[in-house]
Amino acid sequence: MRPDPSPADLFGPLLAKVQERAILPDGKTFVDALPKRPVAEIMRDFADLPAGDEALRAFIAANFDLPATTETAGRTASAQPVRARIGAMWKELARAPDDLVTGGSALPVQHPHVVPGGRFREIYYWDSFFTMLGLVRDGEFELANGIVDAMTDLIEAHGHVPNGTRTYYLGRSQPPLFHMMVELLDDPRPDVAARRLSAMKREHGWWMAGTDELAPGQSAARGARLADGRMLNRYWDPRDTPRDESWREDVATAAKSSRPAGEVYRDLRAGAESGWDFSSRWLGDGTLASIRTTAIAPVDLNAFLFGLESAIAASPDAEAGRYARLAEQRRDAMNRHLWNAEGGYFADHDIDRGALRTPLTAAALAPLAVGAATQEQADSTARAVASQLLAPGGLRTTLVETGEQWDRPNGWAPLQWIGVAGLKRYGHDALARDIASRWVDTVGATFARTGLLFEKYDIEAATVGGGGEYEAQIGFGWTNGVTADFIDGYALLPSGK
């Protein structure tokens, strides 16, 4: 089934012109806009538009209702203590159901929910789990359940949870954490549990589509059967065009590469599906133009799919035994191809080269978070984390600086939580608490100076993070959720209170 048309499908040459000329400062603004009249009429008149940026700006203003360039949620500096401010932010980030979307790129959402904040005006997949941690801590169960119900709707409608609730995100997902959301709420109602279990199975089928027929050495969409017959997954997007929301940036990146532009675009889209957009994990020579995401089997993706398979295996489903076998097969593949015995931690696998990618990253902790590691592997990983990834302000993302936002010196709330959860699971409580405390101090100290909560932080300098395609956003869902979970779970008193 072809996905709903994206803005690039509807407004192709107009979108390209608006994005490439940087008519709007943020490329996401145009693709989130609402057309004021039928698409065919807009495109007919665009064909006769005089040349020049001013004429184009006037045309956009006349034919589209643009979203606010600066969202108001969380942008007013607060004098509250940081934990109190997090609790107050849920109302600002909450959105009512919108199941009557007409025009534009927004997908319908039929339940109350929470958005991350800033330029991110819609539900995002993996963001939502970390946001839910705080919602649950603050008793906001209607919003937490609304998120999971919305995710269930999306899986039933599309086979997967899109990156976000926009048509231009339908070709890709994000790290599959739906099963963790279901476990977090642990709703005992039989009809609700059965529907969510069915959605988990359907999501698994989407990630594994086409893999049953693969011979050793072959890949298809999000699956790769390695030369020894073991199966691992990768990130992918069926489209090989620039991302609608980052069209200008993607065209510029492809122009710097000697590879076919379509390959670069698909790897950029796959990198966006990873949630780590972008990181040295996906790069060949350290530059974005060398990105090769689809050639890499990521350790965290495979860990989360192990978690999904294990969750279904632990259910009363008639096929539970099959999913238990799939989980064990994946654990075997991870031990064979993602374990760095010399370094003592899990890492990514290069599918094209048939070799381990040895750099240590925070993704190494994902197998611990889902219980895929042995105790010996967890102990070794903890030592590597303590000696290399522990920064003054929390858990490092990677050990290299590339200017990309998912590299050093940035730290990210989801990676802090995954690391803390994984270390706690295997008894490394002191290190887990240390990471949580450092992160809370970073968020608290920055909040004390600014009165704001941010998407990402520089954990070397305990300040706002940088790098990437846009400035650090304010709000911010997953920072709020993880920080609240750490403060409450460890009874921490953050810097600046």
Image: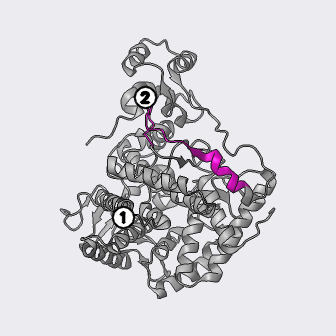
Secondary structure category for the residue under label 2: loop
Q: Is residue 236 or residue 492 the one in the foreground?
A: 492
Q: In this orientation, does residue 229 appear?
A: yes
Task: Report the side of 445 relative to 324 (left or right).
Answer: right
Q: CA distance from mark 1 to mark 2?
A: 37 Å
Q: Which residues are magenta?
A: 85-109
Q: Residues within 10 Å of mark 1 (few under 14, many from 20)?
A: few
Q: Is residue 246 above or below residue 348?
A: above
Task: Report the side of 116 relative to 313 (left or right).
Answer: right
Q: Residue at x 69, y 68 (%)?
A: 487
Residue named by callout 2? 103
Task: Report the side of 442 relative to 422 (left or right).
Answer: right
Q: Quadrant of residue 109?
A: top left
Q: Nearer the viewer, mark 1 or mark 2?
A: 1
x and y percent of residue 203 in the render? 33, 58
x and y percent of residue 332 in the render? 33, 79
Secondary structure category for the residue under label 1: helix
Quadrant of the image for the C terminus?
A: bottom right
Q: Is residue 386 above or below residue 25?
A: below
Q: Residues within 10 Å of mark 2 (few under 14, many from 20)?
A: some
* Residue 95 lies within the magenta run: yes
User: Which sits earlier in the primary sequence, circle 1 or circle 2?
Assistant: 2
Q: Residue at x 55, y 58 (%)?
A: 141
Q: Residue at x 32, y 40 (%)?
A: 3
x and y percent of residue 339 in the render? 42, 78
**Numbered badge on residue 190:** 1
